[in-house]
Amino acid sequence: MSTPQSPETVEVEFISPRHLAGGGDPAWITVPLHRACGWSHGHDPLMPRVILSSPDQKALLRLEPNPEGQWWTLRHAPAPDHPAWYASFGARTPVEIIAAFTDALTAPAVTATASADPYEPLHQADWSPARGADGLVSPDGTAYVQRLGVEEPGPWFVTATLGQDRPVWQARFAERTPPHLIAAFTAALVDPSPVPRADSPRMLATRNPNLITRTHQEVPAAQVVSALEKRVEALTRHRIGPPPTPSALRPPPPRNGRSR
């Protein structure tokens, strides 16, 4: 029996590995895109979906409950130096991992020089080659990353699974998806930090203690409420950049020591 919580606290479960923690709150992705990154959204209260478009109208993110397919789909129009591409994510893909992808997409262009090898974070996390197929598999065997194609590189697939016939979720990236965005996704995938879930029993794909670790904590309610707001503020600061230093605000000294 859990300890009764006070009105000032809520019970939160922290789950690891994060790829088996369930989808989480979609607002972790949609609210920062709108408030920190300027993505616009339509308003159709009769439809159970969310559609967000980037300020330049080149990217469109759709969240739509689809029992037969992917719930999240992001499509990006072609650019002068890059063809069109898409990415999609299943319903149980943790929002924290998808958010790493969208954060990298909306980050200032100067940060796009980060590691462009999606396999590199997996190697660093001791993932091993998958038996009988190309790609890498997690140490516990519950996650698999593969790129199709040999002579001509094809799309990427990231799959969380509890066995051959028990897929949990899948992320799919078109062959022209910028590699640094997929690398951001795989880096978040292998992040050992647990993720919080307030309603984890319903979300979890498994409760097998050999596969997941569940840690109950009483967390201040104000902390839970403010977590999303802090994320929005952090992304806003990251996009705007640090404030100018005092020296940058001073006028230049007069030439020849005299002012006009």
Image (cartoon, rainbow, N blue to C red):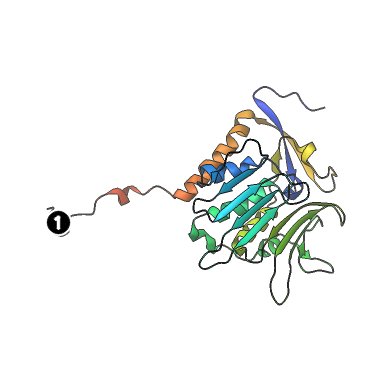
Q: Nearer the viewer, residue 83 or 182?
A: 83
- Seen at 66% across and 64% down, the residue is 120
Q: Nearer the viewer, residue 241 or 70?
A: 70
Q: Nearer the viewer, residue 209 or 182?
A: 182
Looking at the picture, how far across and down is residue 181, in whole percent?
61, 59
From what the image shows, is residue 35 above or below residue 239?
A: above
Label total for image: 1
Q: Which residue is situated farthest in the bottom direction here?
A: 151
Residue 29 shows up from this direction:
no
Q: What is the three-letter code of the residue carrying label 1?
A: Gly
Question: In the image, is 36 to the left or to the right of 254?
Answer: right
Looking at the picture, how far across and down is residue 212, in whole percent?
80, 46
From what the image shows, is residue 203 above or below residue 102?
A: above
Question: In the image, is 250 to the left or to the right of 185?
Answer: left
Residue 223 shows up from this direction:
yes
Looking at the picture, how far across and down is residue 81, in whole percent?
52, 68
- Seen at 63% across and 35% down, the residue is 45
Circle 1 Cα neighbour tier, 10 Å, few/some/many (<14 / 14–19 / ≥20): few
Q: Quadrant of the N terminus?
A: top right
Q: Secondary structure at mark 1?
A: helix
Question: In the image, is 249 to the left or to the right of 82?
Answer: left
- Seen at 49% across and 56% down, the residue is 108
Q: What residue is shown with label 1?
A: 257
Looking at the picture, how far across and down is residue 179, in whole percent?
61, 64
- Seen at 77% across and 26% down, the residue is 3
